Amino acid sequence: MYNKIKALLFILVIVFNQSLKSQPGIRGQIIIDSTLWAPVVYLSYITDFDKMYTLKYEMILDTAHINKNGGFSFSTDYLPEGDNLLRVHICKKKSPPVSLIIGGDEENYLFIIVNKKFHTIILDTSKTGIFKNVRFEGYYPNRMLQQIDEIASYLDSTSFNEPQIKNELIHNAIFEKLRNFADTCSNPVVSLYALNKSNFEKNYPVNQVFYKKFLSKWRRERSTYFNAFRKKIPILERHGIWLNILVAGIFLVLGFVLSWAYFKFYRKTHNLLGKLSIQERKVFALLMQGKSNKEISEILNIGLSTVKSHVNSIYSKLEINSRKEVLNLSTQI
């Protein structure tokens, strides 16, 4: 009888622990060097992907003490509905709570996606660094974040000793893989997480079709993250539109100015030609052909002195001074 009661209690403990694990909230276990790190975990709310690496006091939602077994927990009842991007971090002893170490072996933060209807469990078993060997249980999007971070981590593997073109090709291949991940992902916040790792603001101009299709796919999504993302895309589109309008405007003005100058010169020239007599027009036509005074005299059967008189009259009426200017006029008429 005693053994049966003992077995029943054991089963109840297991059931209770499993039930506790499945309760909504954030629970975790982390191994820290107590001589270096303070036994406190901070939870920050990320409202915009642009603020992922920003840390201010007003961003910190809650703190949790790390017990002697490395355990900690947070309630999530107060979070907005849907998926929320959060950051957990710890600080070195005597450092302020807003100390964020980005990169290197002492990087002290971790991004997670939390939905207050589900539980999220963070298990960090690494003994060589903080959040270096994390395993997620519970809410599934966090495992996808790990896959994205793993893909993005190859960006840091490029060498300064390699040719720049090779590094650019590697980066482009990684960014393409991140875009493909975002395109096939079923979770909208995870999709945006992947795109923000892909340097989308710089590669948008050459991948506009992709982003238009992406926005069309998530057109019903109304989270704060997507609303912020949509504001960035139209800004980039407007830049392109205004650039096209500016270029078109420049060509339009240039065309108008050239047309105005041409027609003004054309009218002026023809008005001047209208001042020539019939005989002067004949002389002018031969001048435009490059004929000499003697040749004009023979062709029109007039005296050389008469030709010279006509030429001087033509110069005066057309406001020119040489045969070269006559030839220039011939190209404009």
Image (cartoon, rainbow, N blue to C red):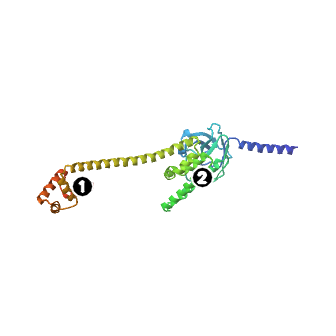
**Please, what is the three-letter code of the amino acid marked with disc 1?**
Leu
Name the side, left or right, on which 150 lies relative to 233: right
| Residue wearing tag 1 | 329
Q: Residue furthest front?
A: 301
**Quarter occupied by the N terminus:** top right
Name the side, left or right, on which 235 lies relative to 61: left
Q: Few, some or many C-alpha atoms within 10 Å of disc 1 (few <14, some 14-19, many ≥20)?
A: some
Residue 181: give its label: 2
How far is disc 1 from disc 2 in space, using C-alphas?
67 Å
Asked if the residue under mark 2 is in contact with the one under mark 1, i.e. CB atoms within 8 Å, the reply is: no
**Please, what is the three-letter code of the amino acid marked with disc 2?**
Phe
Residue 156, image x, y percentages = 54, 56
Question: Mark 1 or mark 2: which is in front?
Answer: 1
Evaluate whether residue 285 shows in this view: yes
Q: Nearer the viewer, residue 90 or 259?
A: 259
Q: Residue furthest right?
A: 1
How many circles with numbers are drawn on the protein? 2
Quadrant for residue 301, please give it. Answer: bottom left
What residue lies at 46% left-to-right and 45% top-to-bottom? Answer: 238
Q: Is residue 242 above or below residue 292?
A: above
User: Please, what secondary structure does the residue beneath circle 2 have?
Assistant: helix
Name the side, left or right, on which 253 lies relative to 28: left
Residue 328, image x, y percentages = 24, 56
Q: Is residue 304 above or below residue 131?
A: below
Q: Few, some or many C-alpha atoms within 10 Å of disc 2 (few <14, some 14-19, many ≥20)?
A: some
Q: Nearer the viewer, residue 81 or 91?
A: 81
Q: Nearer the viewer, residue 212 or 16?
A: 212
Q: Earlier in the sequence, mark 1 or mark 2?
A: 2
**Quarter occupied by the C terminus:** bottom left
